[in-house]
Amino acid sequence: MKRAALGLVALSGCFIGAEDVPPPIDAPGPQGRYEAAVAFDTARGRMVMYGGVNEVGVQTATWVFADGRWSQLLGPGPGAREGAAMAYDVARDRVVLFGGDVLDPSAPCDATWELAGDQWSRVDAPGPSCRRGHAMTYDGEARRVVLFGGFAEQGCDEGACQETWAYDGAWTRLHRPP
């Protein structure tokens, strides 16, 4: 993917960016959004943001914030989604995105995506059911990404999920309440 440099911006408030169409090259960065997925890529020293929603609709762009400026990664990604979660996998040097509400029926909501450098790819890794609003983080001791909770319209007893999953290139359920 190529990057389009988009200038300086300060993060403030609860909205942290959104766009339907990439802004002009001199734009300061993404427009306001909520329910975006965010992770910090420690190898590249940048915050990565994907998806989210605003008054324009559900967003599809990948934005990075590094060295005091925003830039947009150009190229295909996980599709329009809100409420997904991301974490940076230190051991595998990639950002992992899972779930969220999707608008495109050909883009499954239970898909796992990885951002390696500046390229997104979908991973065929059976795992958690569709969900939104879940949390993901990296467990440095176990060298894997951990996912907990979320809200599901199907699975997880159709409500708040209490499952805990781990991801290291493949999903493993760590805990499911009785």
Image (cartoon, rainbow, N blue to C red):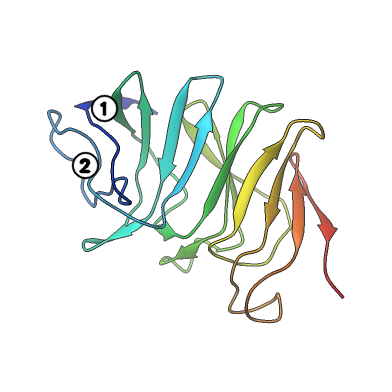
The residue located at (56%, 58%) in the rendering is 99
- First reached walking from the N terminus: tag 2 or tag 1: 1
Percent coordinates x, y for residue 72 in the rendering: 31, 33
Q: Which mark identifies residue 161?
A: none
Q: Is residue 1 left or right of residue 124?
A: left
The quarter of the picture where the N terminus appears is top left
In the foreground, 79 or 41: 41
Dividing the picture into quadrants, the one containing residue 109 is bottom right
Question: Where is 147 relative to 120, above or below?
Answer: below
Q: Residue furthest front?
A: 13
Q: Is residue 12 left or right of residue 170?
A: left
What secondary structure is marked by label 2? Answer: loop
The residue located at (44%, 26%) in the rendering is 46
Q: Are marks 2 and 1 in contact (CB under 8 Å)?
A: yes
Q: Is residue 47 left or right of residue 11?
A: right
**At label 1, which amino acid type do we have?**
Ala
Residue tagged by mark 1?
4
The residue located at (55%, 45%) in the rendering is 86
In the foreground, 120 or 158: 158
Q: Which mark identifies residue 22?
A: 2
Question: Where is 85 relative to 163, above or below?
Answer: above
Percent coordinates x, y for residue 52 in the rendering: 37, 55
What secondary structure is marked by label 1? Answer: strand
Cα–Cα gap, marks 2 and 1? 9 Å
The residue located at (56%, 19%) in the rendering is 43
In the foreground, 9 or 44: 9
